[in-house]
Image: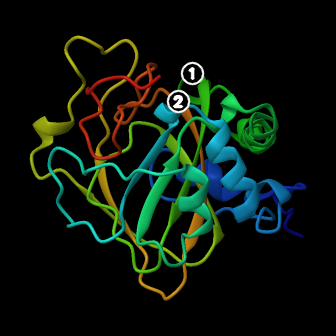
Amino acid sequence: MAVSTDVRTELLHIDGAAFAENFAKRPLGVRHTLADHPLLTLDALAELADRLPPASIERHRADLDLMTPGGAPELEGPPSQSVREIDTGNTWMVLWYIEQDPEYKALLDACLDEVETFVGDRHGGMQYRRGYIFISAPNATTPVHFDPEQNLLLQIRGRKEMNVGRFANTADHQPSSTDTSTGVTATSIACPTSKNASSWIRMTASTCIRLRRTGCRTGPRPRSRFQSHSGPPQA
């Protein structure tokens, strides 16, 4: 009789055998029970948006072009208003570094504690933990970009389509000659889009795990989602 390697906890459902087979090689499906979590309602996220420092809020129009070199103009106004009006506001926004808030740090740690049991010391284990909340209006397009971390993408509300590709020139994703000890640039590019008539919310739990080909920098992210990740640091 086969023994199940699934691990079901209060927050996540991870298939241990699939994780071992796919980690650092290809996408892996993970189920969760966060959809009704009180910290992830629109009202709770609106309050969080106003508590976070301005440098941790990024907001753009939701109807950007697929290719947006140099980033996109920032929107103004109270962050909480953007969250509460997300269904009609034509806005795409990110709450960066939610671990700055004690309650959200506890939620992030609860999720990544579960993942760490599977990661173990692979590729040096987890180096740091970061959490981001993405909130988008219906039919939004996120321009092409790359992520330097290993990401756990947890869709909380709505539907989202994610397309992943690779750089045509392999030289574009070779390790940095000045930063090979802390990580390398990512080997994939992503274009997330929302094609349904409702808004969506996603929590991203990120960690640095040093991989052979894909890694991350130990420093902060750039100010804009669409800038080069060697761009200016964010507070």
Amino acid at dot 2: Ile
Amino acid at dot 1: Gly
Q: Would you call the spot at circle 1 few (<14 residues within 10 Å), some (14-19), or many (20 or more)?
A: few
Counting from the top left corner in percent of width and height, residue 40 is at 74, 58
Q: What residue is rendered at 44% in x and 19% in y?
A: 219
- Towards the viewer: 40 or 173: 40
Counting from the top left corner in percent of width and height, residue 173 is at 21, 37
Residue 28 can be seen, yes or no: no
Q: Would you call the spot at circle 2 few (<14 residues within 10 Å), some (14-19), or many (20 or more)?
A: many
Question: In the drawing, does residue 12 fall left or right of residue 9?
Answer: left
Above or below, comparing residue 31 to residue 159 in the picture: above
- Towards the viewer: 93 or 163: 93
Above or below, comparing residue 157 to residue 126 in the picture: below
Question: In the drawing, does residue 224 fall left or right of residue 34?
Answer: left
Q: What residue is rendered at 37% in x and 53% in y?
A: 75
Which mark lies nearer to you, 2 or 1? 2
Counting from the top left corner in percent of width and height, residue 182 is at 40, 16
- Towards the viewer: 96 or 166: 96
Residue 148 can be seen, yes or no: yes
Please, what secondary structure does the residue beneath circle 1 have?
A: helix
Residue 67 picture quarter: bottom left
**Marks 2 and 1 in Cβ contact (< 8 Å):** yes
Q: Which mark is residue 124?
A: 1
Distance in Å between CA atoms under marks 2 and 1: 7 Å
Counting from the top left corner in percent of width and height, residue 180 is at 31, 15
Residue that numbered label 2 is attached to: 209
Q: Which mark is residue 48?
A: none
Question: In the drawing, does residue 51 fall left or right of residue 198?
Answer: right
Q: What residue is rendered at 84% in x and 67% in y?
A: 2
Number of numbered discs visible in the structure rendering: 2
Above or below, comparing residue 182 to residue 172 in the picture: above
